[in-house]
Amino acid sequence: MVVKGKMLQKKPSRKEFLSVKSKKKTDILSESDMEDEEIEEQQSLDGDEGGNSGSDLSSDGDDTFAADVLQGSDDEEKGSGSDSDLDSDDSDVEKKSRAIDDEKEREEKEALDELQLNIQEQPDEFRLPTQEELEEEARGPPDLTGLKQRIKEVVRVLSNFSSLRQEGATRKQYIEQLKMDLGSYYGYNEFLISSLVEMFPPVELMELIEAFEKPRPITLRTNTLKTRRRDLAGVLLNRGINLDPLSKWSKVGLVVYDHQVPYGATPEYMAGHYMVQSASSFLPVMALAPQEKERIVDMAASPGGKTTYIAALMKNTGIIYANEMKEQRLTKLTSNLQRLGVTNTVVCSYDGRELPKVLGHNTADRVLLDAPCSGTGVISKDESVKTSKNAVDVQNCSRLQKELILAAIDMVDANSKSGGYVVYSTCSMMVIENEDVIDYALKKRDVKLVPCGLDFGRPGFVRFRERRFHPSLEKTRRFYPHVHNMDGFFVAKLKKMSNSKGVPAAASEVEEVVEEGSEIEPSTTENPEAEIPKPQRKEMSKKGNKSSTTNNASLKRKNEQKPATTEKRKKFKPLPREEISKAREEKRQALREAKKKATTKETKSASKKTRSGA
C-alpha cells in the first residue's frame, strides 16, 4: 500500500512516457507479461529513489526503442527478401508463358505448311474418275468415305456447272456418276434413283435422300368421339409420354418426342381415346371435309385410320362404306372401328373397280380413294422399296389407279346438295401415279379440280419432262419428307360436274385436235401407201385377196394420173398445251350453260302443261 502511495505522489518523467510509447509499439503477447513488468518497475523504484530510478527507466526505454528499430530493420530485410523471391517467381512465369507461346506459334506454322502441302497435292478442280479407276473400285470393297466425298463434289459442280465443270465433261456424265454413287452408297436400284434425279435438282435431291434415312416423328390422332386433345395430352404426360400439339393445321394431332411406357398399350389406347396415325394420313380426310348425315365411301379403308377420322368429323351420323379388298386386313379394320367407338360404318370386301355395281352409280356424296401405290414416299418406313420397285411395278400401279378413280367418280352424285367430291391420294412420289392419273380422269369424266383446302404443301406438276398436264393440276398438293417432315404424299380433290359417264365435250375436243392437225391430212390422203413400209406391202401383196389387189391397182392409177409434187412436206407444229386446254375448258363451260338452259326450258314447259291441265 505504501508503494502505491509513493507512486501516486511521484510525477512521471519524460523518459517514462517514452518507455510507455515504445511499449505500445511492441507486440505484447499476454496480460500476465505486462503485470510482471509493472512489478519489476515498482521494485526498481523502491530500491533506487531519485536519479537512479530515472536512469534505469531511461535505459529500459532506450532498450525497447532500439529493439523496435532493430525489429523494423529486420522486417525490412525480410520484406526485401520476399520481394526478391516474388521477382524471381515472376521471371519464371514469364519464361514459361513465352515457351508456351513459342510452342503454339511452331504448331500453327507446321499446320499451315501441312495445309498448303495438301492443297498442292489436291487440285482445286474436281475430276471425274476414269473407267480404269471405276473398275479398280469395283474389284475391292466399297470405300464409303470416298463415295460420300465424291457425291458432295459432284453435287457442288452441278450446282454451278458452267464455272466448276471439268473441261470436256458433259452434264450427263456428272449425272450418271451421281446416280451410280447414290445407288451404291444408299442402296437404291437404278430405276428409282433415276426417277428421283429427274424430279429434283441435285441439292434438294440430297436433302430428300438424307430425310429418307431418318424416321418420321410419331404422331397420334385424338378420337374426338371419346375425349378432347387437351385432356388426352395431360393424361399421357402423367404416364411418362413427352408430347406436344402437332401443328397449327391440325386440331387433333399430337407428336411424341419420347416415351417411358409403350404408347400403343396404354389404358387410353385400349379405350379408344387415340389412334397411332402418321401425319400425312390426316391430309386426305381434311381435304375431303365430310359433313354430318352424308353418305361417304372409303374405297381402301384398312387399317381404319382415315375411316375413323371421317366418323369423328361426322359425329357418328350418316353412313360410311368402308371397303377393303384383302380379307386378311379386315380384322384390323373392324377391331379399330370397335375400339374407337364408330357406329355409322358398314364394312365390305369388294374389288374397288366393282363398287359402282354394288353400291350403285351416283349414290354417294363423297368418295375417298387412298389408292394402292408403289410406296416410294414412305421409304423411311419400308427400306425394301429401294430395291424392290421397278418401272413395270409402277406402270401396273398407275393402270390400277386409273381404273379405281373412274369407279370413284361414277359413284359420286353430281347433284348432291353438300357433296359431289372425290379425293384421290397416294403415298407415292412418282408422277405417273399422281398427276398422270388425275389428268386421265379429267379427260375421261366431266370433273374439275378444286382447291384441297390445305394451306401448305407444294403444287403438283403442270409439266414434267416431255409430259404436259392440265393447268388446273396446280391445285393438287405434294408433301415431301425434307420439306414438311412427313411421309411423301399426294392429294387431289375433284368436283363432279355432271352424272354423264363420258365427257360431253370429248368428241368436240377430238374434232378440235383434228382441225388443228388438218395441215397433214392432204399429204396422207394423197398417198395412203406412204404409211406402210415396203416389206409389209410385199407381204400384203402376197397374202392379199383379189379385192386388195384391185384396190392397190386403182390407187396406183390415181397416183400415176396425178403430177408428182416436188415440194417438201410441211412439218406440223401443234399448238401449246395450255391453249388447247383453255379451249377445251371454254367448250365445256359452253356445254354446261347449254344444258342448264335446256333444263330450265323443260321445267318451264312442264310447269305450263300443269297449269293448262289444271
Image (cartoon, rainbow, N blue to C red):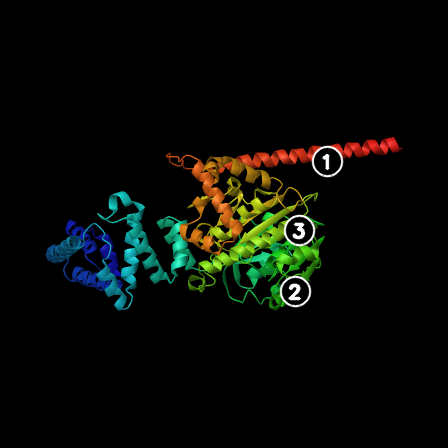
Mark yes or no: residue 59 visible: no
Q: Residues within 10 Å of mark 1 (few under 14, many from 20)?
A: few
Query: In this figure, which residue is indicated by the disc labeled 3?
Result: 411
Q: Which label number is shown at residue 462?
A: none
Query: In this figure, which residue is indicated by the disc labeled 2?
Result: 334
Q: Are the residues at dot 1 and dot 3 in contact (C-beta closer than 8 Å)?
A: no
The percent coordinates of residue 353 (x first, y second) are: 62, 57
Give the quadrant of the N terminus: bottom left
SS for dot 2? helix
Amino acid bearing label 1: Thr
Amino acid bearing label 3: Met
Mark 2 / mark 3, whichever is N-terminal = 2
Query: In this figure, which residue is indicated by the disc labeled 1?
Result: 599
Amino acid bearing label 2: Thr
Disc nearest the viewer among 1 and 2:
1
Q: Residues within 10 Å of mark 2 (few under 14, many from 20)?
A: some
Estimate the spatial distance between the alpha carbons at disc 1 and disc 2, rounded to whole Å: 45 Å
